Amino acid sequence: MTILLALLAGLIFGLGLLLSGMSNPAKVLGFLDIGGAWDPSLAFTMAGAISVAMPCFFWARHHSRTWLGLPLELPARTGVDRKLVLGSVLFGIGWGLSGICPGPALVGLGGGFLPAGVFALGLYFGIVLYSRVNEPVQRPDA
């Protein structure tokens, strides 16, 4: 049942990305071009997504299990640190250069959009590189 609901949620998310235009890099770049021919339509999409997600996050802060009874774990870290700022800057640069972010990249990959495939490969290797660089050092027991 959990897998079926996860599949349904992913399909709804992907459909939302397609319908809103967020899987179209040209539309995203138009949204990011605030100094030129700015297209504010994605702001309404983001506002709608935030208005749906916000009550869910408030609910999750006060519960330890999902509606299906699975463990619910929220991130323990709440502060802003160097890693968060650097990651945000890198994400913003990549998004601004390509008009693609991880969710729409997977939608584009499913549709055979070559730039999304290149983006997904870069995403994969970035994750691998990060995990290798930030892997905790194992100390021998004394």
Image: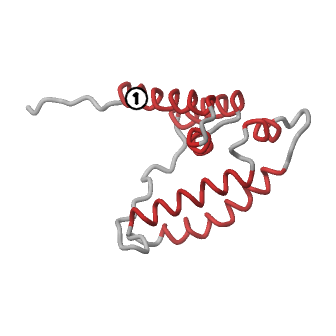
The residue type indicated by label 1 comes to Val
Label 1 CA crowd tier, 10 Å (few <14, some 14–19, many 20+): few
Image: 130 above or below 84: above
Name the residue: 46% across, 61% down.
6
Residue 7: image x %, image y %? 47, 59
Residue 137 placement: quadrant: top left
Query: Is 94 situated left or right of 45 in this image?
Result: left
Q: Quadrant of the C terminus?
A: top left
Of residues 11 and 102, which is closer to you in this image?
A: 11
**Residue beneath disc 1:** 128
Name the residue: 43% across, 65% down.
4
Of residues 21 and 136, which is closer to you in this image?
A: 21
Residue 72: image x %, image y %? 39, 64
Most distant residue in the front direction: 112
Q: Is mark 1 on a helix, strand or loop?
A: helix
Of residues 43 and 85, which is closer to you in this image?
A: 43
Residue 80: image x %, image y %? 55, 42
Residue 100: image x %, image y %? 66, 36
Residue 30 placement: quadrant: top right
Most distant residue in the right direction: 37
Image: 52 above or below 113: below
Q: Quadrant of the N terminus?
A: bottom left
